[in-house]
Amino acid sequence: MISLEQLQAGLSISLGEEIALNDTALVYIQIDQPAIESMAQSRIRWEEWDKKSSINGVAAQQILTRPDYSGGGIYLIFVDDTLTFLQPHMPGEEGTAPIPQDQLAEIAGLHVAEIVRDLVMEAIVIKARSLLDKGPS
């Protein structure tokens, strides 16, 4: 769940001006966050790459010899059934540390959760902006 303060910060960034907490609170209570989160989760999935299949016409051998791959597992993240990430190393870390095969599902799941949080935040800010534009009910 996005907190009231997170929404206020997101709105302020999105609108380029500070938004009063009272105004934010009025729209915050109108937003169905669980429904937005459920929708975001339904848009995203991951799968382990078999290191044999080509990806978007690129041969497996070409992917395996990329400079950012140093062994380990590789996973793919799809948003709206479009390949969005080919993750050949530990996400969020500097360098190209390999993804341990026995931790691949956990790491991919955490990566997906981070993307879902971003999608949820974006959708909630858009909804809040729409409600602010309508003015008081």
Image: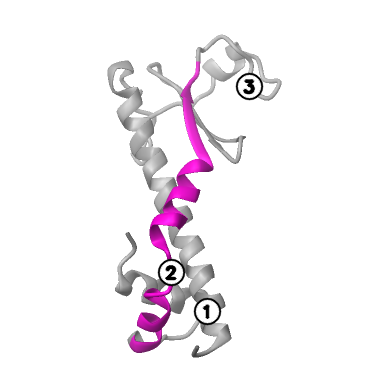
Where is mark 2, residue-wise? Answer: 31
What's the amino acid at mark 2?
A: Ile
Q: Residue visible at 52% across and 70% down?
A: 127
Q: Position of residue 71 (x, y in %)?
A: 40, 16
Q: In the rendered image, which quarter contains the N terminus?
A: bottom left
Classify mark 3: residues with Cα within 10 Å, few (<14), some (14-19) or many (20+). Answer: some
Drawn side of residue 97 relative to residue 79, left or right: left
Marks 3 and 2: CB-CB under 8 Å? Answer: no
Q: Residue visible at 48% across and 54% down?
A: 119
Q: Position of residue 130 (x, y in %)?
A: 56, 76
Residue 131 has which mark?
1
27 is within the stretch colored magenta: yes
Which quadrant of the figure has residue 105? top left
- As helix, strand or loop, the secondary structure at mark 3 comes to loop
81 is within the stretch colored magenta: no
The part of the chain drawn in magenta is 22-49
Front residue of 107 and 136: 136
Drawn side of residue 122 relative to residue 23, left or right: right
- As helix, strand or loop, the secondary structure at mark 1 comes to helix
Q: Please identify the residue farthest to the front as the structure is shown.
A: 137
Q: Please identify the residue farthest to the right as the structure is shown.
A: 57
Drawn side of residue 99 relative to residue 88, left or right: left
| Residue 87 in view, yes or no | no
Marks 3 and 1: CB-CB under 8 Å? Answer: no
What's the amino acid at mark 3?
A: Ile
Q: Earlier in the sequence, mark 1 or mark 2?
A: 2
Q: Earlier in the sequence, mark 3 or mark 2?
A: 2
Classify mark 2: residues with Cα within 10 Å, few (<14), some (14-19) or many (20+). Answer: some
Marks 3/2: CA distance?
39 Å
Residue 55 has which mark?
3
